[in-house]
Amino acid sequence: MATNRTFTMIKPDAVENNYIGGILKMINDAGFRIVALKYTKLSTEAAGKFYEVHKERPFYGELVTYMSNGPIVAAILEKDNAVADFRTLIGATDPTKADEGTIRKIYAKSIAANAVHGSDSDENAQIEGDFFFSKLERF
Ligand code: CMP
């Protein structure tokens, strides 16, 4: 059964390039409601924990360094079929393979600096949202 929430981060490259507004506008225009929103910076330890699932991958060290390099925007988003629809909106992990009109096609620089994160399952959406937000921070 599909649930109706997903989790996203606007990554350091997109924040640094002043794309927060453009990306949030695309998210709202696609019909997602913002349930929770936070502008913060991950420590190396926190980035390592968030991406622990990729620990054995060759790019893990680069990913953790990159994601703790500057501020990010974290958000929980709500919409019918949120996880799948958000992954369609952001496009492929590698921006050179992302469809026209997707967030990564428009805003991402590379596979490492790919502008946004989107949960890959309902289970991970719950885990990732809980990583950043308490119950008092969700509306
Ligand atoms: P994200 O959706 O945040 O989930 C895991 C991240 O790892 C992914 O986006 C990319 O930023 C990063 N990633 C995936 N594959 C590679 C790769 N081959 N090289 C560097 N980073 C990668």
Image (cartoon, grey):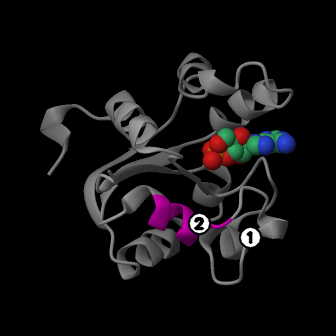
Residue drawn at (74%, 51%) of the image = 113
| Residue 63 quadrant | top right
Q: Is residue 61 visible?
A: yes
Asked if residue 86 lies in the magenta stretch, the reply is yes
Disc 2 crowd rating (10 Å Cα; few below 14, some 14-19, many 20+) is many
SS for callout 1 = loop
Disc on the earlier residue, 2 or 1: 2
At horizontal 38% and vertical 82% (from top left) the residue drawn is 29
What kind of residue is marked 2?
Answer: Ile
Ligand 1 position by quadrant: top right
Q: Residue at x 54, y 71 (%)?
A: 89
126 falls in the magenta region: no
Q: Nearer the viewer, residue 18 or 64?
A: 64
Labelled pair 2, 1 in contact (Cβ < 8 Å): yes
**Disc 2 marks which residue?**
90
Task: Give x and y (percent) for residue 34.
Answer: 28, 61
Identify the residue under disc 1.
98
In the rendered image, the vertical position of residue 66 relative to residue 47, given as above or below: below
Residue 28 vs residue 68: left or right? left
Magenta region, residue range: 84-91
Q: Nearer the viewer, residue 18 or 92?
A: 92
Image coords of residue 12 (percent x, y): 62, 48
Label 2 C-beta lies within 8 Å of the nearest ligand 1 atom: yes
Q: Residue at x 63, y 32 (%)?
A: 68
